[in-house]
Amino acid sequence: MISHHPSETTLLAYAAGSLPEALAIVAATHIGGCSACRHRLEGLEAVGGVLLDALPPSALSDDALDRLLARADEPAPALPPVVNAGLPPPLDRVPLGRWWPIGVGARWRPVQAEGAAWGGLILVQPGRALPRHGHDGLELTCVLKGAFSDGSGRYGPGDLSEPQADHDHPPVAAAGEPCLCVIASEGMRLRGLLGWGQRMFGI
């Protein structure tokens, strides 16, 4: 049972195509497994269509029809191949880097995405905590396997965490099995010695 969902603002940005690619990948992963959010998304897209219909018409360039017909003759773009068997869409077709250790009991695998946000997979062993941190902008985390808890609740498979920018939380993987998540962020502020190193090296 999925209990945590994206905010209306985030879902609207996803529908409008204005989320940075890494954040959109996380949102799409959650939406693919959440019928409630797919229904909400359909409603937002319908509203967007009505708003577009209400806009005043704009003049087209003289060669607009020729360019449209030329594009109609082009072959449809091929669907990217599956490169990560075992991961849900769209992660199964997204290029990923290698696994990197990021502390005791945690590993990180970056996703190749364009835009202002960064993202990737994170795997945390049961009972282990990630470094305490805050946020500069939007951060989204979707649980793929296992579960984790932070100051705002417990998140299991399919749940999406969307903490506030000033929310300082140390996520802790639940007991039982490793917690695998896909995460994306517009900015992260580490605490303690890690935060000092982050500021020292300007990362």
Image (cartoon, rainbow, N blue to C red):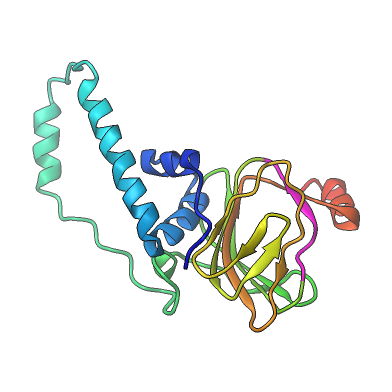
**In the orientation shown, which residue stands out farthest toward the bottom?**
176
Occupied quadrant, residue 65: top left
Which residue sits at x=23%, y=29%? 50
Left/right placement of residue 167 relative to residue 55 reads right
**Residue 35 versus residue 62 in the image, above or below:** below
Left/right placement of residue 145 relative to residue 135 reads left
**Residue 114 is one of the magenta-drawn residues:** no
**Residue 88 versus residue 153 in the image, above or below:** below
Of the pair 173 and 71, the residue shown nearer to us: 173
Which residue sits at x=49%, y=38%? 9
Where residue 142 appears, as percent x and y from the top left, is 54, 61
**Residue 133 is one of the magenta-drawn residues:** yes
Of the pair 92 and 145, the residue shown nearer to us: 145
Please identify the dominant SS of the magenta region.
loop
Of the pair 127 and 36, the residue shown nearer to us: 36
Magenta stretch? Answer: 129-136
Where residue 148 appears, as percent x and y from the top left, is 66, 68
Which residue sits at x=50%, y=49%? 6
Where residue 140 appears, as percent x and y from the top left, is 57, 53
